[in-house]
Image (cartoon, grey):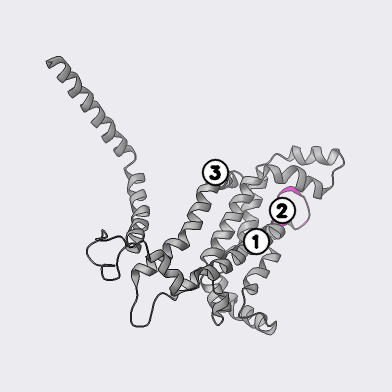
Amino acid sequence: MSNSLATRTVAGGRARQKVMSWLGLHAIAVALAIAFIGPIVFILLTSLMSDQQALTKNLWPTSWHWENFGAVFVQAPLLQYFFNSVLYAGLATILMLISSVPVAYALSRLKWRGRNMMFYLVIVAMMLPPQVVAVPMYVLWAKAGLTGTLWPLILPNLVGDAFSIFLIRQFLITIPQSYSDSARLDGASEFKTLFLVILPMAKPGIAAAALFSFLNAWNDYFGPLLYAGENPSNWTLSLGLASFRGVHQVQWNLTMAATVLVMAPIILLFFFAQKQFIEGIKFSGVKG
């Protein structure tokens, strides 16, 4: 019995030592994970509280109010906001890919005079805050009669997005030039080389750029507020969340429930696309 007890004691000591060693090696990662997950857990728990308990010192729900998730659809037309967000983010991403991929291909795979200068202009465009050109752009779209809609936010993607061009270009550089040369020797045009040879190998980089574009449009608040703020029928989810905050009272449990519903599609999208996203980001910085 004593030998068995000693053996279990030694095994338990080794297990605790391994746990402490693991925590020592990953302390920073664990702390960052807690800092990231903590607010999400707080939002989820608050969304299941009563209005009287929300934002009190009692952080655990005394009673579970799952009906809060149904109540948000009564208080605001979330389905309409969801459709508008999907329309805005989806069309913006599609148009971005149609316009940005050929530009990134030309900047990475073709040799032509002024290519480096054009790439520098792309980098400069990345540094330009959108608020700088907000006034002249609003005047332009107002004269076109498109204010009050989401089209002023969707149509500019037809001329490309600087960050997406940069990201896809960096990924395309990592693909050996021999693939393009072989396709040209077989008589393929540049369009065939792009669509049949390069694009299938560039899926991770393109997926990463598409995910960034979709997330940027989904979370955009300034753009929809500027162009569609006067027309509630064209509000996105980011604007719709603001409708849960009244002038004199805020129902924080419903606000948090709506926040959970807004975050859920993005979280699911990231989990399904994280492999392509991480791979695209990893290889986009290999070469300069």
**Which residues are the magenta region?**
101-114
Quadrant of the drawing holding the N terminus: top left
Residue type, label 2: Leu
x, y (%) of residue 171?
Answer: 63, 47
| Element carrying mark 1 | helix
Circle 3 residues within 10 Å: few <14, some 14–19, many ≥20: few
x, y (%) of residue 104?
Answer: 69, 54
First of labels 2, 3 by sequence position: 2
Question: Was residue 105 drawn as part of the magenta stretch in this picture?
Answer: yes
Quick check: marks 1 and 2 in contact, CB under 8 Å?
A: yes
Q: CA distance from mark 1 to mark 2?
A: 10 Å
**In terms of image quadrants, where is residue 244?**
bottom left
Q: Residue at x 70, y 50 (%)?
A: 108
Q: CA distance from mark 2 to mark 3?
A: 26 Å
Picture disc at residue 122: 1
User: Where is 224 relative to 16, above or below?
Assistant: below
Mark 3, residue position: 275
Mark 2, residue position: 107
| Element carrying mark 3 | helix
The secondary structure that most of the magenta stretch takes on is: helix
Residue type, label 1: Val
| Residue 190 located left or right of residue 231 | right
